[in-house]
Image: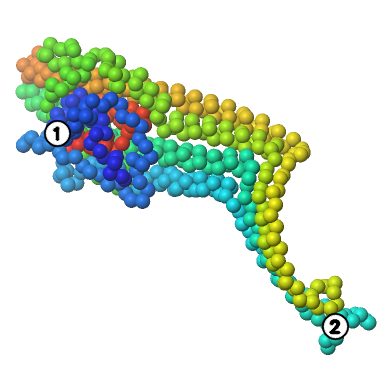
Amino acid sequence: MTQARFRRSQISTIGLILSQALGLNLLTLNAFAQSPNDAARPALPTPMSASTLIGLEQPPQFVMPPKAALPSTSAPSNVTGSKASNTQGQLVDLIQLYQEAAFSDPVLNAARFNYVASKELYWQGLSLLLPQANATPTGTRYYQRGANTTVVSTNPGNSRVFDQKSYTVTLTQPVFNVAALEAFKQGDLNTKIADMRFFLAQQDLIIRVSQAYFDALTSQDNVELYRNKKDLIKQQLDIAQAKFDAGLATIVDVNTAQAALDLANSQEIAAQADLIVKRGVLEQLVGHSVGPLKPLVKEAKIDGVLKDPRSKNKDSKGNPIAESVNPQLPPGQTLDDWINQAEAANFNVLATQLSVNLAESTYRAAQALNYPSVNFVGTTGYNTSNGTPNSYTPTNTNVYNNTIALQMTIPLVSGGFNSSVIRQNAALVDQAKANYDNARRTAAQNTKTAFTGFYGGLASVKAFEAAERSSNSALESSKLGFQVGTLINIDVLIALDTLITTRSQLQQARYNTILNAIKLKAHAAALTDEDLISINTLLR
């Protein structure tokens, strides 16, 4: 991992937006401080170059930004406000799992080895334009024996043995060979395509690790939610039983609470099973078992959400409300800006664009099947012999041979093969262009989905936070009403279930918003490890 990826000047505003809009005021701006020059730069970063991405020789090395001082009181570990049962040292975070997955994930490892192998395509293509030399050494021993009256030798037995030795060195240099030139271009293009595919695999790993992490965190929070729900229902069951024993409530109140408790118990069991499955996805990425995860911090609400352009309206208590899904953002942050970035810099778009160039080069190489080729050919050789099979008189010869020539090869008739190959590759060019067009459209649509999901998620978070406050107030009112006899127990249980459901939806909205932020930057080829670090600082 190159250190260049961690320049503070490249830290995006997404981490700040998240920390503000999700009600997470844990961090100070000093953790993401930028120079005055950085502040003047466009919000959308430029596409990452090959040299700034993950290296192949060593695991990624992260430079963690300093965390701001935390409040003296322990922060809640999940949306329920309850504390985690595990100590800090037992919890794993997003960065730790990503570091392990970067060199243990089989998918990325396969992409890494394919990347290394594809790099050789350039040299293979270049070799076709460079001189080719071959040596042909030979050695022959002859044994002759006379028959009848034929005199072969005066040696005893009328026989003779003689040797011939030779070598030839041939040097060939292409002078005019369109097919070889296009093959070199294809090797270079294939190498660049491999670059794009590997960079895409790297960003995909960030998304997969983040998705698996927050999916597991959702299940982990749900286990705690339903456990807390059970505790609250048990309290309500005890109250209902006490009122029934005192003759102030009916058996219906007791049975209703008992049924709700049994349902909450089943929900907790289902959440625990789902947690095992979701952790299994993480374990597949890192190659070992995964313990409890660091949850997302839930702190007191902050005024930073007012920076959201949609947060103009307020509820009856003065809390800001974000209503619109598509806000009016300044240049550099609008949907069109992100789409333009994705269509121009998305790694899959760039790969398919290069594939068009590759297909066109292959088409030109097919056309070259009908072109003549010219090679410079030089040979040097040496032959020594102490006789020949056709001579009865042994003679010693030593001959040197040297030749220089221009050799032209002109295709005449191929039986229609060359024409068929040309037509085939012409169709493949059209196919590559269609794939490129589809990649651009897909990148634009994915960007639109992530953009809407991110800013819509910000609005949803604010709405669910307001709903949580209202649901909590409704629960307290229902409890009071049940105590004074104006409401029955089922009213309390309904309010409790509404609160738990709202908190579950709130946590899911937070996670989805973060994931959409990651996907948005990935579609624009602007996702780096720094973005993962900024999100990781929101975990406790």
Kindly identify the amino acid type of the residue bearing the numbered disc 2.
Answer: Ser
For mark 2, give the secondary structure: loop
Where is residue 312, by image quadrant? Answer: top left
Q: Position of residue 18 (x, y in %)?
A: 22, 27
Residue ID at (58%, 39%): 182
Q: Position of residue 225 (x, y in %)?
A: 20, 31
For mark 1, give the secondary structure: helix
Mark 2 surroundings within 10 Å by alpha-carbon count, few (fewer than 14), some (14 through 19), many (20 or more): some
Kindly identify the amino acid type of the residue bearing the numbered disc 1.
Answer: Asn
Note whether residue 40 is visible: yes
Pick the front one: 384 or 54: 384
Classify residue 524 as left or right of residue 181: left
Farthest bottom residue in view? 156
Farthest right residue in view? 149
Q: Which residue is mark 1?
A: 30
**On residue 329, which mark appears?**
none
If the image is split into quadrants, where does the C terminus sit? Answer: top left
Classify residue 163 as left or right of residue 445: right
**On residue 153, which mark appears?**
2
Label 1 and label 2: CA atoms lie apart by: 103 Å
